[in-house]
């Protein structure tokens, strides 16, 4: 199986934009509103002949009573636990925040986990200088990138593939069957996905519209191997008078 790399960080630092940049897709929804990504979102990256699975996670917020943010924290921890390496994304425009420090603390508790600290939104030389502030997090080298235009991502990926352990040759997952679970909001699509996978893969709440992205999950039980796709609820178009 390919190595797994998780993208983590507080809300609205550009994790989904970086995910889309590395996977060369637009799988993850990107919005200026914080908290758009909720579930773990999987994609595939390739660099210099090295393949890896990439996970986009929701923004980590410690101490919130919000039902979604509590579930997001759990999803982020699961992603950290199952990954071979982490891309910890921070926002150079806002500098080091208390939330960044909380995420850094979580990462340090994951002993032996390889991590690259990524200062995003570095669109010019002046902002690159500000990235030095993030050395105080104590996570080593700071990689400056602009996920929205791609600058710096080549150097980041060079460093990433060097720290990934050798992988076993795996079946080309592009050729695997893809099965979608569809239906209107709040009928239990995510609950069914979780039941089939045997884990709390997707966030489930009684609130309609909990799932926002299309979530891809690899199913490898009982001799089967395919992609299971949990979709956002289909809504009837409103009539315009």
Image: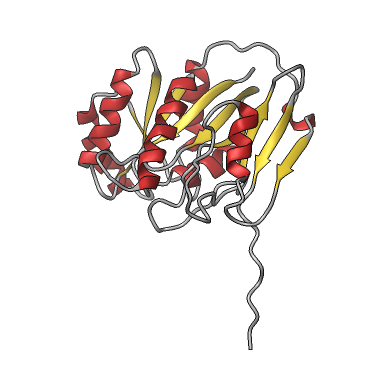
Q: Quadrant of the C terminus?
A: bottom right
When the figure is inspected, residue 214 is found, relative to residue 88, above or below; the finding is: below
Residue 125 visible to an observer of this rendering: yes
Q: Give the percent coordinates (x, y) of residue 168.
A: 66, 11
Q: Is residue 230 left or right of residue 106?
A: right
Residue 140 visible to an observer of this rendering: no
Q: Quadrant of the N terminus?
A: top right
Q: Give the percent coordinates (x, y) of residue 231.
A: 64, 48
Q: Give the percent coordinates (x, y) of residue 185.
A: 59, 56
Closer to us: 163 or 64: 64
Question: Looking at the image, how many numbered discs can be counted on the residues?
Answer: 0
Q: Is residue 96 left or right of residue 217?
A: left
- Residue at position x 63%, y 63% in the image: 235
Question: In the picture, residue 198 is in which quadrant?
Answer: top right
When the figure is inspected, residue 42 is found, relative to residue 211, above or below; the finding is: above
Closer to us: 89 or 119: 89
When the figure is inspected, residue 168 is found, relative to residue 52, above or below; the finding is: above
Looking at the image, what colour scheme do you see?
A: secondary structure
- Residue at position x 41%, y 39% in the image: 71
- Residue at position x 36%, y 44% in the image: 69
Question: In the picture, residue 133 is in which quadrant?
Answer: top left
When the figure is inspected, residue 140 is found, relative to residue 28, above or below; the finding is: above
Q: Give the percent coordinates (x, y) of residue 163.
A: 47, 16
């Amino acid at each position: 199986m390919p190595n797994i790399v998780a993208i983590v960080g507080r809300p609205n630092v550009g994790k989904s934009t970086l995910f889309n940049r590395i996977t060369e897709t637009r799988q993850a929804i990107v919005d200026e509103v914080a908290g758009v990504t909720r579930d773990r979102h999987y994609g595939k990256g390739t660099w210099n002949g090295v393949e890896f699975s990439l996970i986009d996670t929701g923004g980590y917020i410690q101490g919130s009573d919000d039902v979604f943010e509590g579930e997001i924290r759990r999803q982020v921890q699961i992603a950290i636990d199952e990954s071979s390496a982490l891309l910890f994304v921070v926002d150079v425009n806002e500098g080091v925040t208390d939330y960044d420090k909380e995420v850094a603390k979580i990462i340090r508790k994951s002993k032996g986990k390889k991590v690259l600290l990524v200062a995003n939104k570095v669109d010019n030389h002046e902002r690159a200088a500000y990235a030095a502030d993030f050395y105080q997090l104590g996570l080593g080298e700071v990689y400056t990138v602009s996920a929205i235009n791609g600058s710096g991502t080549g150097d980041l990926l060079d460093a990433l593939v060097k720290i990934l352990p050798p992988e076993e040759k795996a079946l080309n997952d592009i050729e695997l069957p893809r099965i979608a679970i569809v239906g209107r909001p709040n009928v239990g699509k995510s609950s069914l996905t979780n039941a089939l996978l045997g884990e709390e893969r997707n966030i489930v709440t009684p609130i309609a519209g909990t799932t926002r992205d299309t979530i891809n999950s690899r199913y490898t039980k009982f001799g089967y191997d395919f992609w299971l796709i949990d979709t956002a609820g289909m809504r009837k178009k409103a009539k315009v008078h």
